[in-house]
Image (tube, helix red, strand yellow):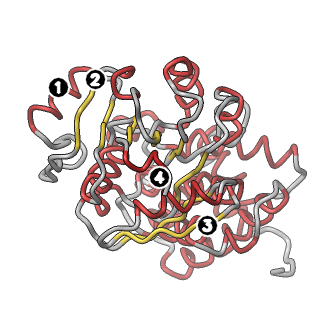
């Protein structure tokens, strides 16, 4: 057992996902420090002992401490768990570099690609925290509300460090929460990022009333596109067939707890991106990811027709109806 296991774990990001993971880890017996960047929000969390905004009626365990001071939350911590949105990931790490001990493992549960570069989050961590030698990513089919309510869940912990993957999975693996390990960091990160774009497509198809047949076809052909791009970028086929790939894709494409799916549903109603963002009130990662995926498809010369149509709906004012018409009229080809 690593000595870091006896120390508190710091969860950075007090939104729905960070709060849910903090609650789960505290229930598993760890001393947890939950930090967020909005002091007023953290005061409410401390006073109410729950995240009423995102996870109403789920009480914080006694071993979960609420912190508004970043330096204090990171002092003598065993490992750090980041639940920071991908668009703010690099800027946060850059601001916290001097506060993170070089020997402290860094784990993230964030999903997405860096805006403007298309880089995976482990690349961002390596660039901003070059001294960090032990890193891991958590991903898989997870809705924060279900994790917070202790409903059955399974995820993947991926790391180049087998010992760190084992350590993190050991503490996540509690109650109704099951954790598997992997060393395919690239595949796990890509699966978690790309599924958000396809969830927008799935929501739009359902919003247009195209039915279950169309949804199943879209998910399956979308997964094929994920595999094409993902394996080209170094991910492994078995990863995309697992929890972080197919599992997460099915979850976000079929359940309205997914913000990305709900965005697709509202796009089908004719609402604009801005109107939808205001209604949902939280970040919709697939919007930013769609733009980065198109850049990656050109860099790696991989054809991604479904992703391309989602991009055009989001950024070129193509209607969802026209996007579907294009996909249906494409030249016949072999499935494989």
Q: Secondary structure at mark 2?
A: loop
Label 2: how many residues lie within 10 Å, few (<14), some (14-19) or many (20+)?
Answer: some
In front of the other: label 3 or label 2?
A: 2
Residue 143 location, quadrant:
bottom left
Comes first in the chain, label 3 or label 4: 3
Label 4: how many residues lie within 10 Å, few (<14), some (14-19) or many (20+)?
Answer: many
Q: Which residue is mark 4?
A: 260
Comes first in the chain, label 4 or label 1: 1
In front of the other: label 4 or label 1?
A: 1
Q: Nearer the viewer, residue 204 or 285?
A: 285
Q: Which residue is mark 3?
A: 245
Q: Residue 28 at what x, y percent from top left?
A: 29, 60
Q: Give the CA separation, mark 1 to mark 2.
A: 8 Å
Quick one: which residue is furthest to the right in this view? 301
Comes first in the chain, label 1 or label 2: 1
Please give the name of the residue rendered at 63% of the width and 38% of the height, measured from the top-left corner. Answer: 315
Q: Nearer the viewer, residue 181 or 308?
A: 181
In front of the other: label 1 or label 3?
A: 1
Q: Which residue is mark 1?
A: 43
Please give the name of the residue rendered at 54% of the width and 17% of the height, measured from the top-left corner. Answer: 98
Q: Give the CA separation, mark 3 to mark 2.
A: 35 Å
Q: Residue 32 at what x, y percent from top left?
A: 30, 43
Q: Which residue is mark 2?
A: 68
Comes first in the chain, label 4 or label 2: 2
């Amino acid at each position: 057992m690593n000595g870091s296991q006896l120390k508190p774990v710091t969860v950075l990001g007090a939104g729905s996902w960070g709060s849910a993971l903090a609650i789960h880890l505290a229930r598993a017996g760890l001393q947890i420090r939950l930090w967020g960047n909005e002091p007023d929000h953290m005061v409410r969390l401390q006073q109410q002992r729950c995240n009423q905004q995102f996870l109403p009626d789920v009480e914080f365990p006694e071993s979960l401490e609420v912190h508004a001071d970043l330096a204090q939350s990171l002092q003598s911590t065993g490992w750090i768990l980041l639940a920071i949105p991908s668009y703010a990931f690099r800027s946060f790490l850059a601001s916290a570099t001097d506060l993170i001990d070089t020997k402290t493992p860094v784990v993230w549960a964030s999903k997405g690609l860096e805006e403007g570069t298309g880089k995976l989050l482990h690349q961002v961590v390596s660039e901003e925290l070059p001294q960090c030698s032990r890193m891991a990513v958590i991903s898989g089919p997870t809705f924060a509300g279900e994790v917070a309510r202790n409903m059955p869940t399974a995820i993947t912990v991926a790391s180049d460090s087998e010992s760190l993957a084992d350590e993190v999975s050991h503490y996540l693996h509690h109650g109704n929460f099951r954790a598997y390990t992997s060393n395919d960091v690239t595949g796990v990160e890509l699966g978690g990022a790309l599924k958000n774009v396809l969830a927008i497509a799935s929501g739009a198809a359902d919003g247009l009333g195209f039915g279950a047949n169309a949804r199943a076809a879209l998910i399956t052909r979308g997964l094929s596109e994920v595999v094409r791009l993902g394996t080209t970028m170094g991910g492994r086929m078995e990863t995309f067939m697992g929890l972080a790939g197919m599992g997460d894709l099915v979850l976000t494409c079929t359940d309205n707890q997914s913000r990305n799916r709900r965005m697709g549903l509202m796009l089908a109603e004719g609402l604009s991106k801005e109107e939808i963002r205001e209604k949902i009130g939280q970040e919709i990662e697939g919007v930013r990811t769609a733009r980065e995926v198109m850049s990656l498809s050109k860099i790696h010369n991989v054809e991604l027709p479904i992703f391309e149509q989602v991009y055009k709906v989001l950024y070129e004012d193509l209607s969802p109806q026209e996007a579907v018409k294009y996909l249906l009229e494409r030249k016949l080809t072999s499935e494989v």
